[in-house]
Image (cartoon, helix red, strand yellow):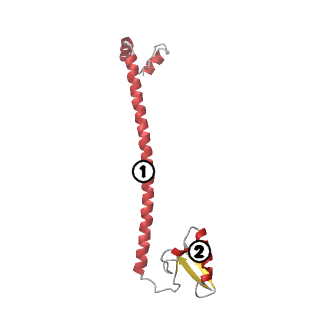
Amino acid sequence: MYSYIIGEETINAWDGYGGAVVYTRSAVLPETIVPELERAAQNVGRNLNKFFKTDNTCGPEPPLIERLEKKVEEGEQTLIREVELIEEEVEKVGNTERTLFQRLFEGFKELHRDEENFLKGLSEEEMELLNELKMEASEVEKLFGNALPIRKLR
């Protein structure tokens, strides 16, 4: 039994095989099975015309330095992809934090406007009383049992 590795990119025994494996009883890939292979390739979204038959003979082993360089390059590409994913996540978190801080800032501005409007709405007598007591408006309201009208103007 013979096997043929077919694929869309260069494949050799030292790098690991990819693509597809076709097992036959003859030493040459029979042309009679090519139409069936084309249909099978189409079923998985591939075009058999872009595939090539590999040479199943193993040439000499590439030098160790070449194999190591290839592994380092693959590792670099993996690291680049991981860093890009982490950067995307950090950016998402940063955007969320900015949004939260913007909402918090807007809330503080609204509180400040409410306080200003409240103080503008007090009569002179109420303002004098607050200044003399050096109390917050809510404390004064409690002190007088909610009888003192505290107005909130917008």
Q: Nearer the viewer, mark 1 or mark 2?
A: 2
Residue positioned 53% across, 75% down in the render: 49
- In this figure, which residue is indicated by the disc labeled 2? 38
- Residue 141: x and y in percent read 46, 17
**151 to the left or right of 26:** left
Residue pictured at 43% horizontal, 37% vertical: 103
Evaluate if marks 1 and 2 touch, with contact meaning CB atoms under 8 Å apart: no
Where 45 falls versus 25 (above or below)?
Answer: above
Q: Where's residue 134, x and y in %? A: 37, 19
Label 1, label 2: how many angstroms apart (C-alpha)? Answer: 45 Å
Left or right for 7, reference 130? right
Q: Residue furthest top?
A: 125
Q: Which quadrant holds the N terminus?
A: bottom right
Q: Residue at x 38, y 23 (%)?
A: 116
Q: Amino acid at mark 1?
A: Glu
Residue 65 sits in quarter:
bottom left
SS at badge 2 = helix
| SS at circle 1 | helix
Q: Is residue 134 above or below residue 5?
A: above
Q: Residues within 10 Å of mark 2 (few under 14, many from 20)?
A: some
The residue singled out by tag 1 in the image is 91
Q: Check disc 2 and give the amino acid type.
A: Glu
Badge 1 crowding class, 10 Å Cα cut-off, few under 14, some 14 to 19, many 20 or more, is: few
Q: Residue at x 41, y 67 (%)?
A: 76
**Number of numbered discs overlaid on the protein picture:** 2
The picture places residue 95, in percent across and down from the top left corner, at: 42, 46
Mark closest to the chain's N terminus, 1 or 2: 2
Which percent across, then down, holds residue 101? 41, 39
Q: Report the residue that reaches farthest toward the bottom.
A: 27
Instruction: Check the image and report above or below for 76 versus 144.
Output: below
Q: Quadrant of the image for the C terminus? A: top left
